């Protein structure tokens, strides 16, 4: 056997020997793109000409292209919901903080996907920008800047665990009560998504006060952060 | 083996002699292939789906491939084509089988997905080659000349094969899972950004009403991959590199988004298709010339987008020569190349955004109204698609913006990190804030529609348009001057190898 060949043949996986791993990026990208394509609401078929253009008032989001309640719809929903729950458990279980942040990233991304599935595409995109792209980066940043050892372990004390259990149980009970008391109506037929124009108009008329209050709150947070950062000097 | 030798023996001389021709014809062929698909899709829409309604059949659900909706049978399609005046019957018989799958949205999606992924892969490969050629020209040398024959056009492919064959190293103390996962966090969001990017009025893969926010979100996620790469390497230089880059990308995202907001305010929508359609009336209707705020916003967006793609003069994160390569110090082989794939694809995406939002999207500088007298035959529509609007114009503009990015990289020196952050927080951020405020006031004043205001906006529009024209013609004139006097360049090699020398 020439020296440049792998000497320990048993340890090379068949996948690697066939060079299949070369297609891993393509396969993963394709998978992600297929998921995105089946989830993103669409009014125009791909590349097609001559399809009816959506008007401003209708809004572009349609809950899903397939008839609602179809098999594919449910499958997608359960896949994405599972994709939100499993990483959430991962966040609780993992002790390595950076891995925890990655689990959180996957969970937030899945929630954004759920928003897209429910035709709230603006909310989904904002979720991606603010949480997945912004907050999470800050979180990892904080860990990096403050940690002393390379692998920060998260070790809660017993008191903290008990407090967390109490708070979470309370929240669970509340949510279950809300779930039990609400009468749920399933929509008849396809529900159009809220047009962005209406969303913006509502935000600046009916919901102006909460909007402004949230803005003021964020401003206070920013000033506070600047103050803290200055004091350290 | 013998077959491979045979292919090599026949293929290489052909490739060597006609490399440029082959490359060009592949380019043209790809364009024709895309065009044929678009034509087939619209044909299916017009003949098959509408014909089905005319014949009283239930219109098939054209979105998903499910057993309940198998669509029209090929024989029915055959009848419809014949009824629609579809030429020779033998051809129509074949066509009916070829067109049958195209009535399902799922099949269309798969075809278009193939195109998008192909583009996503081809862009970095040829952009890297082009960048090396441009660098060579600027530095009076040749750049890649050998591989593939014509100006080394397949140099990047050869590099890719080399990267694949390199040993895949993972440091012993690295966080192995995150180390493996990090390149995908950088690569996949950029690929997803292509899904919502419009290449033409009807060449949009998924048209979102929030396409702009979606693409910005995807570009923002790229940072996560970089930070994870730096962290998982368990190496101080990597972590410092990742932090430099995250600092830069996160902070430049804000002026970038705000500069885009200016043109969104002027257009009044977040849907990239609608923004593109607004700019159909030629050079002076492009949003960059709409008002002074949009003009400045275009420049500041371009600067911020350079920083968010880690391009020079903001390429601190991966200053290979001085700063130990930043976050990808520990990466080698294929994983290393993913980061560069992501970077070059992101360059295309940000240039595409600049094109759609400021530079008239897929519309040509000629007003679309000039073409209205042409008639509506299919080949006339094709001519209009080339002359007035279409993906060709989009790609031309994007390629020009990419060229400016390359050209800046080899012209400007790298700036220090504190200068980078100063430029963002103290210059670009206040500037874009003022621009957003100004654009809001401008749009608000637009509602008055007084005679003075209409005259005032007209003057600004024409003035800025003329400035833009001066830039465009100046660019062409300087390029022509340089080409005419190419013998004055330093170095015999360059002079002799320049095209046309």
Image (spheres, rainbow, N blue to C red):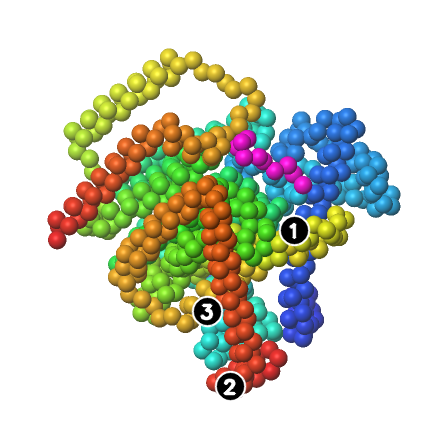
Mark 2 secondary-structure assignment: helix
> Mark 2 highlights which residue?
B488
Front residue of A9/B113: it is B113
**Which of pointers 2 and 1 lies earlier in the amino acid sequence?**
1
Q: Which mark is residue A137?
A: none
Residue B309 visible to an observer of this rendering: no
Residue B369 circle label:
1
Which quadrant of the rendered structure holds the C terminus of chain B? bottom right
Closer to the camera, B295 or A3? B295
Q: Is residue A197 magenta?
A: no
Q: Is residue B400 above or below residue A163?
A: below
Q: Quadrant of residue A211?
A: top left
Q: Chain of mark 1?
A: B
> What is the number of the mark on residue B407?
3
Residue at 54%, 74% (x, y): give it: B477
In the rendered structure, the residue with mark 2 lies on which chain?
B
Frontmost residue, B443 versus A158: B443
B54 horizontally vs B219: left or right: right
Looking at the rendering, the stretch of residues picked out in magenta corresponds to A50-59
Q: Is residue A53 magenta?
A: yes
Neighbourhood count class around disc 2 (C-alpha, 10 Å): few under 14, some 14–19, many 20 upward: few
Query: What residue is drawn where x is 26% and y is 38%?
Result: A218
Mark 1 Cα shell of 10 Å, populated few (<14), some (14-19), many (≥20): few
> Which residue is at 49% across, 51% downward?
B455
Q: Are marks 2 and 1 on the same chain?
A: yes
């Amino acid at each position: 056997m020439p020296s440049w060949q792998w000497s320990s043949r048993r340890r090379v996986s068949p996948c690697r020997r066939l060079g299949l791993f070369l297609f891993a990026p393509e396969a993963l990208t394709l998978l992600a793109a297929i998921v995105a394509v089946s989830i993103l609401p669409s009014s125009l078929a791909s590349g097609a000409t001559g399809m009816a253009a959506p008007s401003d008032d209708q809004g572009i989001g349609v809950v899903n292209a397939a008839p609602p309640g179809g098999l594919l719809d449910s499958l997608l929903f359960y896949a994405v919901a599972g994709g939100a729950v499993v990483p959430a458990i991962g966040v609780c279980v993992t002790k390595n903080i950076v891995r925890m942040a990655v689990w959180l990233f996957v969970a937030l991304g899945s929630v954004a996907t759920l928003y897209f599935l429910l035709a709230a595409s603006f909310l989904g995109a904002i979720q991606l920008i603010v949480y997945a792209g912004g907050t999470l980066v800050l979180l990892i940043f904080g860990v990096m800047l403050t940690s002393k050892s390379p692998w920060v372990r998260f070790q809660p004390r017993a008191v903290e665990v008990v407090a967390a259990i109490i708070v979470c149980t309370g929240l669970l009970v509340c949510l279950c009560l809300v779930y039990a008391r609400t009468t749920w109506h399933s929509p008849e037929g396809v529900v159009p998504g809220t047009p962005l124009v209406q969303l913006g108009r509502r935000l600046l008329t009916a919901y102006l006060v909460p909007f402004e209050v949230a803005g003021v709150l964020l401003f206070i947070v920013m000033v506070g952060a600047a103050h803290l950062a200055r004091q350290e000097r | 083996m013998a077959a491979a030798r045979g292919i090599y023996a026949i293929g290489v001389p052909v490739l060597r002699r006609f490399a440029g021709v082959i490359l060009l014809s592949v380019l043209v062929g790809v364009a024709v292939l895309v065009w044929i698909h678009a034509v087939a899709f619209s044909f299916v829409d017009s003949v098959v789906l509408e014909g089905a309604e005319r014949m009283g059949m239930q219109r098939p659900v054209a979105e998903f491939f499910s057993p309940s909706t198998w669509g029209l049978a090929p024989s029915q399609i055959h009848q419809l084509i014949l009824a629609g005046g579809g030429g020779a019957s033998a051809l129509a018989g074949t066509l009916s089988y070829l067109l049958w799958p195209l009535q399902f949205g799922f099949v269309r999606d798969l075809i278009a997905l193939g195109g998008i992924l192909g583009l996503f892969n081809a862009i970095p490969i040829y952009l890297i080659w082009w960048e090396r050629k441009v660098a060579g020209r600027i530095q009076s040398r040749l750049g890649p000349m050998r591989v593939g024959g014509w100006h080394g056009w397949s140099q990047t492919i050869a590099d890719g094969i080399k990267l694949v064959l390199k040993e895949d190293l993972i440091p012993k103390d690295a966080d192995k899972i995150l180390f493996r996962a990090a390149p995908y966090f950088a690569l996949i969001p950029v690929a997803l950004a292509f899904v919502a990017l419009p290449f033409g009025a009807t060449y949009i893969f998924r048209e979102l009403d929030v396409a702009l926010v979606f693409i910005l979100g995807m570009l923002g996620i790229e940072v996560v991959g970089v930070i994870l790469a730096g962290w998982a390497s368990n190496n101080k230089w990597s972590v410092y590199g990742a932090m430099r880059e995250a600092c830069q990308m996160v902070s430049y995202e804000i002026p970038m988004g705000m500069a885009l907001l200016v043109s969104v305010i002027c257009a009044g929508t977040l849907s990239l298709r609608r923004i593109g359609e607004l700019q159909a009336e030629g050079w002076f209707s492009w949003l960059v010339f709409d008002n002074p705020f949009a003009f400045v916003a275009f420049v500041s967006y371009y600067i911020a987008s350079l920083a968010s793609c880690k391009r020079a003069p903001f390429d601190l994160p991966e200053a290979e020569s001085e700063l130990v390569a930043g976050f990808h110090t520990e990466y080698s082989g294929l994983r290393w190349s993913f980061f560069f794939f992501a970077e070059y694809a992101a360059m295309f995406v940000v240039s595409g955004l600049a094109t759609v939002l400021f530079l008239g999207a897929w519309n040509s500088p000629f007003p679309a109204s000039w073409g209205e007298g042409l008639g509506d035959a299919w080949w006339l529509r094709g001519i209009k698609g080339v002359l007035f609007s279409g993906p060709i114009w989009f790609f031309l503009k994007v390629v020009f913006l990419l060229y400016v990015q390359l050209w800046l990289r080899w012209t400007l020196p790298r700036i220090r990190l504190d200068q980078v952050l100063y430029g963002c927080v103290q210059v670009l951020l206040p500037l874009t804030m003022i621009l957003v405020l100004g654009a809001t006031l401008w749009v608000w004043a637009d509602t008055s529609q007084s005679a003075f205001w209409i005259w005032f906006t007209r003057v600004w529009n024409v003035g800025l348009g003329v400035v833009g024209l001066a830039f465009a013609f100046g660019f062409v004139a300087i390029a022509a001057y340089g080409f005419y006097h190419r013998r004055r360049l330093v170095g015999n090699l360059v002079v002799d190898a320049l095209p046309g020398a």
